[in-house]
């Protein structure tokens, strides 16, 4: 479960409990809003302790959990890069 979020406006980072909830004025949804700037522009943050980047990579772990990290802390960063096409030799 993702429990580290980042505000896209002011970059506040915290767990779900620190964000406020607000009823969608046009429907029945409930929005999570930033406690600092009140925007609903929230996304997951990298779950690596101390990292302040957005969590844009998701992957399962060996223990059956699921991680959401930035690219730098993902399993993809440690894989060899694919060969780049270049001019024929």
Image: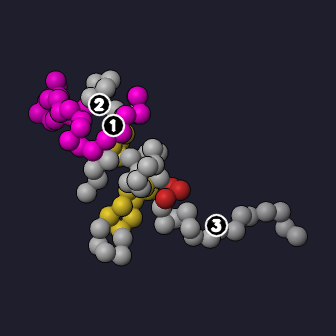
Percent position (x, y) of residue 60?
35, 68
Farthest left residue?
28
Farthest bottom residue?
62
Cβ–Cβ under 8 Å for marks 2 and 1: yes
Residue at the image point whose x is 84% and y is 67% from the top = 88
Looking at the image, residue 5 sits to the left or right of residue 76; the answer is left
Q: Is mark 2 on a helix, strand or loop?
A: loop
Residue at the image point whose x is 41% and y is 33% from the top = 11
Asked whether 63 falls inside the magenta stretch, the response is: no
Residue on which the image places disc 1: 42
Residue on which the image places disc 3: 81
**Residue at mark 3 to residue at mark 1: CA–CA distance:** 31 Å
Specify whether residue 56 is in view.
no
Mark 3: few/some/many CA within 10 Å (<14, 14-19, 20+): few
Residue numbers of the magenta segment:
10-34
Residue at the image point whose x is 71% and y is 64% from the top = 84
Mark 1: few/some/many CA within 10 Å (<14, 14-19, 20+): many
Residue on which the image places disc 2: 34
Q: Is mark 1 on a helix, strand or loop?
A: strand
Q: Counting residues from the N terminus, which is met first, the one under dot 2 or under dot 1?
A: 2
Percent position (x, y) of residue 16?
23, 43
Percent position (x, y) of residue 18?
23, 38
51 to 30, vertically: above or below:
below
Cβ–Cβ under 8 Å for marks 3 and 1: no
Residue at the image point whose x is 36% and y is 39% from the top = 13
37 to 13, vertically: above or below:
above
């Amino acid at each position: 479960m993702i429990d580290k979020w980042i505000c896209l406006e002011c970059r506040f980072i915290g767990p779900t409990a620190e964000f406020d909830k607000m009823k969608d004025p046009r429907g029945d949804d409930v929005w999570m809003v930033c406690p600092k700037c009140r925007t609903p522009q929230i996304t997951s943050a990298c779950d690596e302790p101390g990292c302040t980047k957005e969590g844009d990579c998701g992957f399962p772990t060996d223990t059956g959990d699921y991680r959401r990290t930035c690219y730098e802390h993902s399993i993809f960063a440690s894989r060899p890069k694919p060969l780049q096409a270049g001019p024929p030799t």
